[in-house]
Amino acid sequence: QLGQGVELRGRDQLSKLKMQKQSTDALVALSQATSLRCDALRGQLMEEERRTEELRQRARRVFEENQVAEEELRAMQCRLEALRASASSDGDRLQERGRQMQVQLAKRQAEQASLVEEIAGASHKREQLRKKRDEAVSETLALQRRTANLQALLSNA
């Protein structure tokens, strides 16, 4: 019986050892699978870090480009304001020049109206002088006829 007891205990221990070996093998397989998963995750993490760094660099470039664009925009706005001020100044000068031209035009129109009146007056005076000339010519002709008549009378007398 002692032999059987030792044999049973040996079998029990052998069975326990087999179970422990199976557990160990399962743990080793699980450990290897976990290690492979960790390696895969480490690879993914490195890829994500690389992509994150690329995105950071791209974001930095975009930020710098935006700063340059904002500076250009501010410079353009300053130029636009300067152009507006210049245009306003030019507009003021043009308005003043227009006002001066209107004053000159009004003076010229008044001068023209005065000349038209003078011309009308001169025409009227010329007409009166023509009438007086015509009257003087008529009188001269009448006097010449009378003189001729008187001379004819004197020569006949």
Image (tube, rainbow, N blue to C red):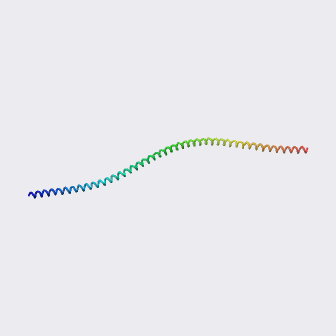
Callout count: 0
Residue that extends furthest to the left in the rendered view of this protein: 1
Q: Is residue 15 left or right of residue 145?
A: left
Image coordinates of residue 9 in percent, x first then y, are 13, 56
Q: Is residue 119 left or right of residue 77?
A: right
Image coordinates of residue 126 in percent, x first then y, are 74, 43
Q: Quadrant of residue 142?
A: top right
Of residue 154 and residue 88, the one placed in the foreground of this image is: 88
Q: Quadrant of residue 33?
A: bottom left
Residue that extends furthest to the right in the rendered view of this protein: 157
The C terminus appears in which quarter of the rendering?
top right
Image coordinates of residue 21 in percent, x first then y, are 20, 56
Compared to residue 116, the image places residue 3 above or below, namely below
Image coordinates of residue 59 in percent, x first then y, are 40, 49
Compared to residue 29, the image places residue 63 above or below, namely above
Q: Is residue 31 left or right of residue 141?
A: left
The N terminus appears in which quarter of the rendering?
bottom left
Of residue 84 and residue 77, the one placed in the foreground of this image is: 77
Q: Is residue 42 left or right of residue 85?
A: left
Of residue 154 and residue 98, the one placed in the foreground of this image is: 98
